[in-house]
Each structure stands twice: as C-alpha cells, then as structure tokens.
Image (cartoon, rainbow, N blue to C red):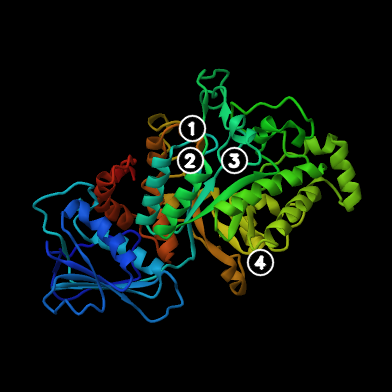
Amino acid sequence: MTDITLFPQPARLEHRGRIFSLAPDALIIAQDRALGELLASYLRPATGFALPVQAADSGESSADTNAIILESAAESDSPEAYSLMAGGTTLRLRAAHRRGFLHGFQTIRQLLPRQILSREVVPGVDWRIPGLELDDEPAFGWRGLHLDVGRHFFPMDFIKKFIDLLAFYKFNTFHWHLTEDQGWRIEIKKHPRLTEIGGFRAETVIGLNSPEYDGQPHGGFYTQDEIREAVAYAGARGITIVPEIELPGHAVAALTAYPQLGCRGEGYEVRKNWGIAEDIFCAGKDEVFDFLEDVLGEVLDLFPSEYIHIGGDEAPKARWEACPACQARIQAEGLADEHELQSWFIRRIEGWLNARGRKLLGWDEILEGGLAPNATVMSWRGSDGGIAAANAGHDVVMTPNTYCYLDYYQSVDTDSEPLAIPAILPLQQVWDYVVIPAQIAKEKRHHILGGQGNIWTEFMPSSDHVEYMMFPRAIAIADVLWRHPQERDYAALVERLRRHLPCLDALGVNYRLLDEPDNA
C-alpha cells in the first residue's frame, strides 16, 4: 500500500513505519467529544465498528490500544492546517483549529480503502492506512464552489450532498446563488410574494432560447428553516455559505412579485428563457432600498457569513435612461451617468451592510462607475477585473470564466456532450488555472483571497446533470486552490484521477469519464 492518491494533494507526505490497521475494538480519543463523534459518524457505517469516543484524559487507554487520537497542536498561522501520523496501533491527527481537524477527517477517509465511503457495512475489508507522516495546509483562504439554483431549483437533499462533496475535497466556501430573473428561491417573511409569485415560472424555453417551450411549470424555494438547516449542516463540515441576492439586475422574478420596484411599474413575468433582461430594480425610488434592506435584513439573520454577495452584474441601463426617477437621482446626487448611478446604488447597499458588520462582495461589473470603498470583487470576465481591483488595494476572489465556469462544454466534441453554454472548458484548461496573475504587483498579491468554480444551471435541470458538469473538473480546481502548484503536470493529474474516480462511484456521484489517453 505505498501508492497514495489524495485530492487535493497535501503539502508534505512521507512514508514512515508500519501500516496502521483500524481494528474492530478501536477507540477514538479526543479532547473535543463532538469532533470525535463526527469522525466516528464517517467511519462507523462502512466498518460496522462501535468506535467509542473516549476523553483524552480518561487514562483508560494504553500503548497497545488501537486508536485514532485527535490532539490539539500548537497555535498555527493557518486555521486550516493539520498533521497526520499513521503507524502500528495509532493514527494521530493534530490541529490547532476545528477546520484543521475537519480537513484531516477527509484525508483519513481518502487514505482508507474506498469502501469506507459506503453507507452500509462492507464486510471483509482490511481497513488499513500506510505508515506515513503528513503535514498540510492550504495555499488560499477562499476555496469555493458556486451553485445557481435560480435557473433550476434543487431540493435540500442535493444541497446537502453538494456540501458533503465540497467538504470531501476541502473546499471551504459554498456560494449559493439564490435569486434570478427565472426564480426567487429564499423565503422572505416580510415580502411573501417573492416566493409565492417570484418562485415559479410557467414553463421553460427548450435549448438555447429556441421558439419552443416545455409547457411544464418550474419552481420552488427554500424556507427559512431549510436555510438554517443548510447553514448548520455546512458549518459542521467547515464550510461557510455565502448567499447571493442579485441587485440591481437579474431582478425580474422580484419585479413580477412587486412591480412597483421597477422603472416601468408593470408588465413583468418571471422569465421563461435565458439571457440578460432589460428590467432591473429602479435606482430612483426610495421604496426599492426599503425593500432591499428588508430582504437583506432577513438574509443577515439567516447567514452568519462575513460576506454577502449582491451580484451587480449584467444590469442594462436602458430602463434607467428612460426613467424620470432615475434621471432625477442622477441630478440630485451629482452623478455623471447611469454607470455612476449603479456605483452609487452599490455604495448605498455597501454602507448598509458595513454598518451591520458585513462585507459586500460583487461580480467585477461593480468596478464600473467607481468601486464602493470596502467592496470585494469576484473577477469572472477573465482576470482583468481582479487584476485592476487588487492593484487598487481591494480584496479579490478570482473566478475567471476561462478557467472556472463549469457550465461550459467539457470537450470540443459538443455533439457527444449534454447541452451546455456554448464555450469549451476541458479539464486540462481548468488545471492550468493560475489564481494570482503575474500582472498583480507583489505587494498587492495578498489581496487575492483565493478562487472558486461556478455552476450556472440554465441547461442543468437535474442534480445528476450538475454532478456531471462538476466532476472531475471541480477536483482539479480543489487541487489548484489547495496547493497552487508552480508546475502543472497534466498527465500526472489524469493518472491520479484514474486511481481516484472510484471514490466518486462509492459516493454515488454522476461524473464525466476521463478521455482516453490519445484524446486527453
């Protein structure tokens, strides 16, 4: 058992000493009982072992005891660092912080035979880990995956599975895109029509905005209790959920529910097709900001995340140009044009969030017309927006569509792939993702918080389809964000994936098969 394949790759791993075999009478020894029970919950189903959790100071164990020991380490600069030592009767996991232990648990799951991922007892397996020493910590503090539930709604059981998969690959951020032109997915008690009306569309266009529709109503939303459940579930696994509430654009579902919030004030319908809508929130009406503060107030109560994503992308200005209220706002605030009006809009929301101890995060369009003073930029239209923002002293999450958009086709042979956004992003290109571009000054590179992959679901009506588009590309993103290797060996990545992909089978994930070597 000398061949070890881990995703993401650890910072240091050395083979040392004897194999560790988990015995039926093994103990978990932990200072934090809740952590010990979480690890036991990962290992009990497949092994059938009792794995009792024993306090570290109970004095009941001996040197001959077969045990997994969770041990506090000295304080570390990295809250996600951990070390692992396996040999003989002992598997010792050390970390200074809870997230380090959680990452160590996932490493243990990957080191054991893949049958450990089963939810039922698997008899006859020797639950062995090679003798080793491992020290590990991530290169970036923001390692995320985004899921759009506005275009297509996904039930809570898939949201939990999505979170579990993020944890397995040591992502720490789930960017949950909750509102769109095609559907509003979060219950807001003060404005119930958002989900009663805005949460459902009459039908969905077929394909790339063809003249045909499927004739099937589509919709759904998450109750506030379900949101709390998801936040707690993610938090227990070391993942922060960052909610996205789109403004001022991508707002047609909200305008359908409350037409007075738009410039026209009437004629809205939850969108049945894709693309960018002309109708956005009116910047000239004070009631729009009252409404948004109501919405965001409930969002803050549900999500403890430091960051709140407000979108800020793809907001056409035609309605504002023709709107007397918006033009009056431009005059009253001394703004030059509608781009500065959007910047004013974003700054107003940012001030409200900052006053409540939160940070605003938006797509790179928030740079247009002047960036809000404390805003963090998510750079998606390539890397240029992130480069400009970082060099100007703003924090950035790098998620360029050219490397990170998992709704793009995975092969140039698009006829053999499910319908996708008409762009190509093969696995090798994802693997080439460089998080910190060379154009960012060295003294500004600390502003790059990390990166993430994005999944937009126009053409993904099922969870199986989402998984197919995620994997194996999301694994490559996890590897890059954890280690950010200076040299990229694509052939070695593919070979590691060939050894690892049976883990996805064990987890019940629908993934795209790797290309054959002559086509890779």
Count of labels shown? 4
| Residue type, label 4 | Asn
Q: CA distance from mark 2 to mark 1?
A: 8 Å
> Few, some or many C-alpha atoms within 10 Å of disc 3 (few <14, some 14-19, many ≥20)?
many
Q: Kindly check if marks 4 and 1 are in contact, taking CB atoms under 8 A apart as contact.
A: no
| Residue type, label 2 | Asp
Residue denoted by label 3: 179
Q: Earlier in the sequence, mark 2 or mark 1?
A: 2
Residue denoted by label 1: 459
> Few, some or many C-alpha atoms within 10 Å of disc 1 (few <14, some 14-19, many ≥20)?
some
Residue denoted by label 2: 407
In percent of width and height, residue 201 lies at: 57, 26
On residue 391, the disc is 4
Mark 2 element type:
loop
Mark 1 element type:
loop
In percent of width and height, residue 262 lies at: 76, 35
**Which residue is drawn at the image coordinates 29% and 52% (left, top)?**
497
Mark 3 element type:
strand
Q: Is residue 142 found left or right of 237 in the rendered image?
A: right
Location of the C terminus by quadrant is top left
Q: Nearer the viewer, mark 4 or mark 3?
A: 3
Q: CA distance from mark 4 to mark 2?
A: 29 Å
